[in-house]
Amino acid sequence: MTKESKYDHHPVRVVKGISLGEEYDPGQIIKLDFTAAAIKTDSLSDLPWTTWDIDDLLPTAITRPRNAVAVILDVDVGDAGSSGEETYIAFATPGIIVAGKTVYCRPDGVNDQSSSRLVIVEMSGDGKIAVSVAASGGTTFDVVAKLVGWVIAGTLTDVVELPSASLKAVFQVSH
């Protein structure tokens, strides 16, 4: 049996992976500062997708590097009623809130027990990141976000074009 599929021309978004402590592309570096103070401390309720303006959250002595493409945060979360509840804070690039590009930070599943995680969130061109919260109740989700670094230069997301000719895939299935 032969199964045939035809694919037309479509732009594709390719997400590059990056790890702390490594250079990804020539010129792209990670600048870390583990002494940075918290830029956001809050007790939150459920929060639909909204944006945080990183420039507005920075202490007065710190400015966003001109060529920063992503922010590196140390995020500590906890929820007063997280036992048996699906609670989290999610981070994404504004306009690119999709599976694989969204980073979730969840409490440990024990009431009022916190957990911490480093996250790299690509910013929009104007220095914003998208945030959403699922809390167990009103103002029960505690978050402390510390700025620990920046991804400088380069890009984390590329848009590439597939060839303009139609692509054809043929699968041969043998029994």
Image: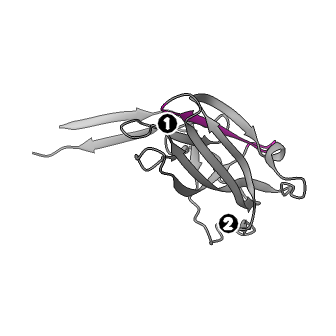
Q: Quadrant of the C terminus?
A: top left
**Which quadrant of the rendered structure holds the N terminus?**
top left
Q: Nearer the viewer, residue 113 or 174?
A: 113
Give x and y (percent) for residue 67: 82, 56
In front: label 1 or label 2: 2
Where residue 53 appears, as percent x and y from the top left, is: 78, 40
Q: Position of residue 39 (x, y in %)?
A: 75, 50
Task: Please name the residue shown 26% across and 36% down the image.
Answer: 3
21 on left or right of 107: right
Residue type pointed to by label 2:
Asp
Query: 11 or 109, which lies in front?
Result: 109
Element assignment for label 1: loop
Residue displayed at 55% across by 45% down: 101
Residue 125 on the magenta segment? yes
In the image, is residue 48 part of the stretch drawn in magenta? no
Q: Which mark is residue 130?
A: none
Question: Which residue ends up furthest to the right in the rendered image?
Answer: 61
N-term mark: 1 or 2: 2
Residue that numbered label 1 is attached to: 166
Picture quarter containing residue 20? Answer: bottom right
Question: Is residue 161 in view?
Answer: no
Q: Which residue is mark 2?
A: 25
Q: Magenta segment range?
A: 124-136
Q: Position of residue 112 (x, y in %)?
A: 49, 46
Q: For marks 1 and 2, give the CA distance.
A: 31 Å
Which amino acid type is shown beneath numbered disc 1? Ser
Q: Would you say 85 lies left or right of 144 here?
A: left
